[in-house]
Amino acid sequence: MSLEFSRLRLDNASQRIMKFIDDNIVGWTEQEILNPILNTVRSLGLSQRVQDAISVEKTDFMKAEVIFDLQIDGTDVSDLLEKGFRPHEINAKGKDMDGADWLRWYDESGKIHFAQKVMHPGFLGYHFMEKGYNDNEYNLQRRIERETEEFLEKERLR
């Protein structure tokens, strides 16, 4: 009978530990992974709109993910900023396609330019999500272990 009682106590302790982790995983992920990513985004000089598009989402029991979802004019630009894109040609849509006949932009000196098509040089991407996750995943694992050990110490006093 005492063996069965011990097994039940262990099962109960295991369930309490898992519930403790599940209750706290979002906050720990925010502190250990999201905040360093946001610091990187700020240091790159990216806009508040980009920062606001990065968040933590609870995805399952004891699981949370950092999500980057930035939509501009109905277009998902998250992957473009994160992973970059190849060189490509950009053409003016034309007024018959609800666009403009000319592209217009300002260079670094403030001079205005017009063209009907341009060759965009491409962009390597910032990779702040990938780097932030890779650099800080270990910190989250250690945090879970440390918090769980502290939880167990408190539970032993009961």
Image (spheres, rainbow, N blue to C red):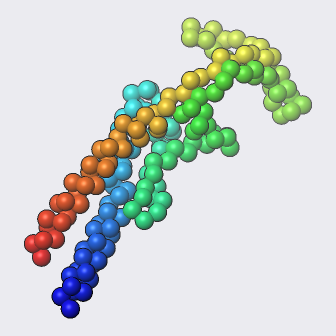
Q: Quadrant of residue 62?
A: bottom left
Instruction: Looking at the picture, tell me which residue is in the foreground, 48 or 11.
Output: 11
Instruction: Looking at the picture, tell me which residue is in the foreground, 117 or 125.
Output: 125
Q: Quadrant of residue 40?
A: top left
Q: Quadrant of residue 93?
A: top right
Q: Position of residue 153 (x, y in %)?
A: 13, 65
**Residue 118 visible within the image:** yes
Location of the N terminus (image quadrant) = bottom left
Instruction: Looking at the picture, tell me which residue is in the foreground, 18 or 35.
Output: 18
Q: Residue at x 75, y 20 (%)?
A: 89
Q: Residue furthest bottom?
A: 1
Q: Position of residue 23 (x, y in %)?
A: 34, 65
Q: Residue at x 16, y 71 (%)?
A: 155
Q: Residue at x 44, y 27 (%)?
A: 45
Q: Position of residue 94 (x, y in %)?
A: 85, 26
**Residue 48 visible within the image:** no
Task: Left or right? Give the position of 110 relative to 55.
Answer: right
Task: Left or right? Give the position of 17 relative to 102.
Answer: left
Q: Residue at x 20, y 82 (%)?
A: 6
Q: Is residue 145 above or below residue 83?
A: below
